Image (cartoon, helix red, strand yellow):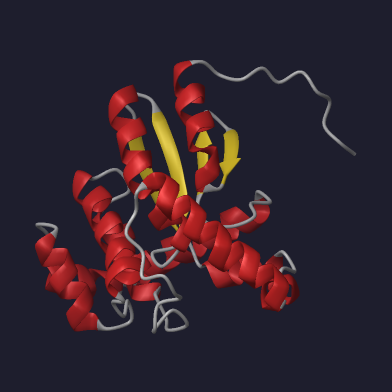
Amino acid sequence: MKRIEYFYAAYSGYAWIGSARLMEIAAAAGAVLVHRPFHLRTLVAARGNAERIADPVYRNYAFRREIERWAEFRGVRMLGRTPTHHQASYETANRMLIANGETDAGTDRLAHAFLEAHWADDADLSDLATLERLARAAGLDGAALIAAAGAPEIGARHEANTAEVIERGFFGSPTYVVDGDVFYGQDRLELVARALEKPFADKWAALA
């Protein structure tokens, strides 16, 4: 079966903008999503991007205007501002997704629900009651997932995902991988769809 490795964080604005389209593409191609939630802030620090992200000119472009345009283009509901609790911890949400299974249909629903709740309904993804409610609405046992999320082995998998994105030189969330070909950003989703149908040629020599 075709696979799309899906590297993202449960609070990522661009992951939300691309979420429905990603699932449409996967369904049309008969591909399974392989969920690989990771700690985005750790990646940002490792890539040395914190200073650029803090720059108000860059932030206004990348985290306001670009989000605004792409949300309109994809027909996605957004608050029209950064969510109130965007700086809170989302690690439990990430771990719940890992605990539910990398390729489970319930994980597809839960990831979409977390992203939508945060960016369209201003939900606090650090609030356990909110996470439990969203999981129940997605047809899952929220209490059990929260308990499972605290297990050391789930934490280790979360750390392993984070270490992997750093080691592979990824830039942020979301990043999609099809047969080893890396696509960074939801604006590459149409390329993901094409790669599932026909791989892209790889003729250029790697840069030194």
Question: Percent position (x, y) of residue 203?
Answer: 76, 18
On the image, the x and y values in percent for residue 93 come to 32, 70
Q: In this view, does 107 lie to the left or right of 43?
A: left
The residue drawn where x is 9% and y is 57% is 139
Report whether 208 appears left or right of 39. Answer: right
Q: Please give the name of the residue rendered at 38% of the width and 40% of the height, measured from the top-left corner.
A: 22
Residue at the spot 44% in from the left edge and 74% down from the top edge: 81
Position of the N terminus, as image quadrant, is top left
Residue 161 visible, this angle: no
Question: On the picture, is 93 further left or further right than 206?
Answer: left
Rendering quarter of residue 147: bottom left
Instruction: Name which quarter of the figure residue 32 lies in.
Output: top left
Image quadrant occupied by the C terminus? top right
Does 131 appear above or below 75?
Answer: below
Image height of 165 relative to 203, above or below: below
> Can residue 109 be seen from the camera position used here?
yes
Residue 123: percent from left, percent from top: 28, 77
Quadrant of residue 10 within the rendered picture: bottom left
Q: Which of 195 and 156 is in front in this view?
A: 195
Residue that sits furthest to the right in the current view:
208
Q: State whether residue 2 is above or below residue 104.
A: above
Give the number of marks.
0
Residue 187: x and y in percent read 53, 43
